[in-house]
Amino acid sequence: MQFPYSWLKELVHTQQTPDELAHMLTMSGLEVEETELAAPEFSGVVIAEVKSVEKHPDADRLNVTQVDVGAETLLQIVCGAPNVKVGMKVPCAMDGALLPGDFKIKPTKMRGVMSNGMLCSARELGLSEKTDGLLELPEQAPIGVSIREFLDLDDTLFTLKITPNRTDCLSLKGIAREVGALTQTKVHFPEIAEVKPSIASKKAVSIDAPKDCGRFLSRVIEGVNAQANSPEWLVTRLTRCGVRSVSALVDIGNYVMLELGQPMHVFDADKLSGSLHIRRAQNGETLACLNEKTVTLSDNTLVVADEQKALSIAGLMGGEASAVGNDTQNIVLESAWFTPEIISGKSRQYGFGSDSSFRYERGVDFMLQREAMERASQLVLSICGGQAGEIVEALGKLPESKQVQVRSERVNKILGTTISESAIGTILQNLGLQPEQTETGYRVYSPSFRYDIEIEEDLIEEIARVYGYENIPDDKSSGILSMLRQPENRRSRFSVYQKMAERGFQEVVSYAFVDEAWEQDFANNQDPIRLQNPLATQYAVMRSTLIGGLIEVLKNNLNRKQNRVRLFEVARTFAKENNEFVQKERIAGLAYGSALPEQWSEKTRMVDFYDIKADVESLLQGQKINWIKAEHPALHPGRSANVSVDGKVVGFVGELHPKWLQKYDLPQAALVFELDMDAVLSREKVRYQGMSKFQAVRRDLAFVLPENIAFADLLNTLQTVKSSLIQEISLFDVYRGKGLPENMKSMAVKVMLQDMNNTLTDEMVEPVINKLIQAAETLGAKLR
């Protein structure tokens, strides 16, 4: 919500500076995002009258003018504007003037003729982007007066960030009420007299959807001049509120919305057929809107229609077929209250919004419609002329006012203050809540402009805002904090983040809403969880894997010349299981580029499967991990594996599939993993045992076995031999080539044996080794 300070001060006579007001509003909950002057800084520009215009002797497009700036003599200024003429009042930059962009004016010769200043356009003063000649001022503009003073260009524009529950502050009336309460200053609302009907014409109204529309008012005004110009004060106020002037009739509707907070609409009465109906749209019904878009309506949409067709989408956008134009002579004014629920979501549904829908979907004052109709009628009659008929009102279901009690003792207990009961009453009265005193405090009936006040705490919050958060004592709270016991079989979440950081990974946070193509590419998910009203097409579904977000961040880094990337994310994924929505917390990582940072002591080597495998082993340290060859839609078929812990698959690891490298324009392969966070946080309970004093014995066994048997299969088979002497079995050599049969390989394993109580002898070791050899033979392995 943007508004000029000058307009606010007409309603509430506050003496605060703009900075003081901005601080006060922000501290009361109406955040001031920005303040700026109505025009850029410039100086030395006064109002001048053009006394004569002659053609430049040496330039066809230049004129030599004599202008009166209130000095004893006229100034000679060379001007190239096409609209310069005798008698016009224009801004004149004098010698020494400083214009926006640090452009300093000084006397200069232009094609041999001395120019002692510059006549200015609106663009040159930073007032407009248009370049249609000199800025022509009203005839009554006083010569010699500063243009900043005359046009009030030192006015301050406030931009407020209004929370969804404070729709009342989307108008000057609401903001003035708020400032009046904060400063305890009387508010002077504009006097709105009833417009007496002078013609019998009226437009009948029928509310066919009473739950969606609580009130609808119409008024016919005949004989208007649609080509009348909006007065300068009206255009200025609209412009300073960030609203573009269109035509007098449209400007009046926008002005009433900004002043009072009630959206308005104007129909061309001669384009309507019969009475107005407020009804639900029919599926497939079409409407050509004022924004030059034709939409297909659905039955969840409320429309204003006549006897033949839909005229507008209620609360969102008017229709082209009933719009006012330059030839309009008779109009119908609309002032209505629609429920927030029926308007909410329609901007996303139809792909466009409006200032009206922004207000309606948050909730408009349901008692404001008649006041707004009278105000709009006043302005139409005074600016465009015409004769007004009587107001026709139709009622649907309106909200009920809520009775809320607030206890003075409770206020001070919650806030930690000592606010007197009379002060509480004054605050509530200044907020327009009309409090009634009770034995314990006050009773309030929530007004129509504050539908959000429902419980006692709502009133306590209002009292705190007006009293001043900075006036509430900030005594330090005291209490006893108990340390929670950490289970021994769970590691802390911080240790996981620390582990990833130690291994060179950086955390990222990505959206849970993703592109549907990611789900198909990286998870082969043909039926993802779809959003009913996505923010954008690329955020249409809920993610079931974290890989897509990591790939997107990788691409952003590559575009910024970061060729070595390590990323991880801990977040929730969402999927359907047995017709139910299931969410799981997962951790995913991505490694790309060289295995180590560039350095002199190591040759550059690209990261590979075994690097990312080591990262996963580090996360699952202390757990029994099995690597199971598997295929995954995101991964290279021959360079991927499932990660199993205690016989349960908890994730996957591997190299990104070549077709995704091509589709997502990645120069080389990225390595990724994704694991269940529960498995990562789990760990074996710590057990302590003594160290053997006796020397360990090592035996090396080289097995010849078929190529299709993986080491994991061999290791699992060897581990079936149960012996307290076996401390470690690990692979240290793989051989293929000369001396071995075709399609065979040799795997050499190291077996470490040790006893806690005795020195091992051959008689103790050999039986164990023989059992290992026998177990390997069950796989078709032979001792080399």
Image (cartoon, rainbow, N blue to C red):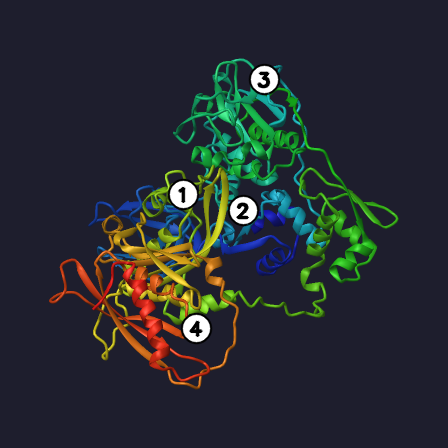
Circles 4 and 1: CB atoms closer than 8 Å: no
Q: Quadrant of residue 756?
A: bottom left
Label ID, residue 766: none
What kind of residue is marked 3? Answer: Lys
| Residue at the (56%, 40%) spot, across then down | 258
Mark 4 Cα-neighbour bin, 10 Å: few <14, some 14–19, many ≥20? few
Mark 2 = which residue? 1
* Residue type (three-letter) at the residue carrying disc 4: Ser
What residue did someone put label 4 on? 724
Classify residue 529 by image quadrant.
Answer: top left
Return the x and y of residue 113 as percentages of the image width and height. 25, 55
Q: Nearer the viewer, residue 693 or 77?
A: 693
Q: Earlier in the sequence, mark 3 or mark 4?
A: 3
Circle 1 residue: 88
Marks 3 and 4, Cα distance to the nearest angstrom? 98 Å
C-beta proximity under 8 Å, tags 2 and 1 = no
Considering only order in the chain, which callout, 1 or 4, is on the residue closer to the N terminus?
Answer: 1
Return the residue at label 3.
203
- Of badges 1 and 3, nearer the viewer stands 3
Q: Nearer the viewer, mark 4 or mark 1?
A: 4
Dot placed on the residue nearer the N-terminal end, 1 or 3:
1
As drawn, which residue projects farthest toward the right? 439
| Amino acid type, label 1 | Met
- The answer to whether 232 is drawn above or below residue 312 in the figure is below
How far apart marks 4 and 2 lie (CA) works out to 77 Å
Position of residue 423 in the picture relative to residue 77 (left or right)? right
Q: CA distance from mark 2 to mark 1?
A: 36 Å
Q: Are marks 1 and 3 in contact (CB under 8 Å)?
A: no
Query: Compared to 439, does 502 lie above or below?
Result: below
